[in-house]
Amino acid sequence: MESESESGAAADTPPLETLSFHGDEEIIEVVELDPGPPDPDDLAQEMEDVDFEEEEEEEGNEEGWVVEPQEGVVGSMEGPDDSEVTFALHSASVFCVSLDPKTNTLAVTGGEDDKAFVWRLSDGELLFECAGHKDSVTCAGFSHDSTLVATGDMSGLLKVWQVDTKEEVWSFEAGDLEWMEWHPRAPVLLAGTADGNTWMWKVPNGDCKTFQGPNCPATCGRVLPDGKRAVVGYEDGTIRIWDLKQGSPIHVLKGTEGHQGPLTCVATNQDGSLILTGSVDCQAKLVSATTGKVVGVFRPETVASQPSLGEGEESESNSVESLGFCSVMPLAAVGYLDGTLAIYDLATQTLRHQCQHQSGIVQLLWEAGTAVVYTCSLDGIVRLWDARTGRLLTDYRGHTAEILDFALSKDASLVVTTSGDHKAKVFCVQRPDR
């Protein structure tokens, strides 16, 4: 029945060329409203048109990386430092990092010092500060075309800058911020807040709508590759797949279909047909994005004998912290707080490898076009694993505290890390044998 309604809507809907939000009769120009925090119900308008068509891929500037000694960057590092560049302008823990998707030559970092910076990877030079935050900056990222950069702090203040002019072009105060993500094909920003809402804005004019979830935090979210749907996970264990155009949930997974604890992370495969969700209940669920049905449940062998958690209970010793799909093999990786990296075979839904870390995994990323998984962990080390064999390929050291976030360049030549040691580091990881 959904396919019929979708095809019917497609027949009556003009090409998606612009993004606008309208009421019953007139266009709402949100940018002209009083700058105070508006009510979500007043702003949540139906979306008419979005240019979700994929733009032509432009060749990035692959020559933007230059290995140079970083003058003026000093520090008493304990043990070896494998990094090429250290960015040391933060004065507290650095929580987040993102690379510009077009050229992979710029990074944005945000930290506990209420500051966010845009800087150059090749030499660590500061390009500009994203000023004005009054709480820890926990989210930061570039738009799909690298023309805009957004930063968000814990209190819910979001700001967007034009990268070339270094000028702030938009800001908004939502509720306490849980996550933030740019749309993959349009200048549209999404964010989840502690009141259960998922917000969506067109930037910079600020046209807005909200997707109202349950009365609990929207803890994680991801726009699907088609750009027309998003999956959002909530603190009560429910999962919702939203239609971004209609503003309504296509599928809701709750009870036994959902998780028995707050969701921590979500991921999708390349074509958007499969979704992985992770939770503090130690389960990773494989969900069909088409049917909304759970088609697989993964759980580490080390906790398989534990009794199942009751409603609202959380595992004290373990949780799923990060997950993702391999782009070249039917494999999925799940990283756990107890330091386990589990590689699962999607075809047979069996555990293929279990790779142990010395401390908890914070995040994992798959290298594009290979079966190599990168992990960063609370011991301050980046590790590269061969998912086919479960073998540790190499590791990179340099931080003196836990790594809190990391990003990988498109060509897998650079890893950029952020840490509780107040620093961000650039590691050159391109190897001749891979």
Image (cartoon, rainbow, N blue to C red):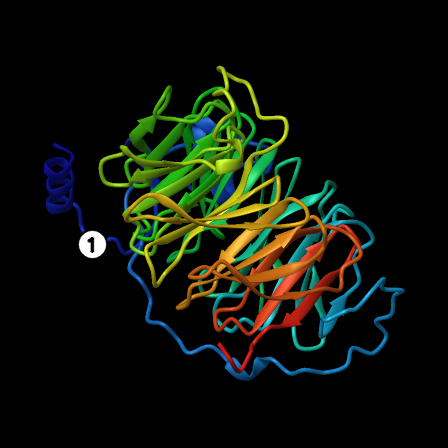
Q: How many marks?
A: 1
The residue lying at 65 percent from left, 51 percent from top is: 377
For residue 149, side relative to residue 351 (left or right) = right
Name the one closer to the observer, 36 or 137.
137
Residue 56 place in picture, x, y as percent? 32, 71
Q: Residue furthest right?
A: 76
Residue 393, visible in the rendered structure: yes
The residue lying at 57 percent from left, 60 percent from top is: 407
Name the one closer to the observer, 172 or 241.
241
Depicted 27 relative to depicted 251: above or below? below
Residue 97, visible in the rendered structure: no
Name the one closer to the observer, 367 or 62.
367
Q: Residue furthest top?
A: 311
> Crowding at label 1, few (<14), some or many (≥20) Cα neighbours within 10 Å?
few
Residue 340 place in picture, x, y as percent? 56, 45
Name the one closer to the observer, 18 or 312.
312
Report the amino acid beneath label 1: Pro
Residue 357 place in picture, x, y as percent? 63, 50
Depicted 350 relative to depicted 250: above or below? below
Residue 154 place in picture, x, y as percent? 66, 38
For residue 427, side relative to residue 192 (left or right) = right
Q: Which residue is mark 1?
A: 15
Q: Quick one: quadrant of the N terminus?
A: top left
Q: Secondary structure at mark 1?
A: loop
The residue lying at 39 percent from left, 57 percent from top is: 326
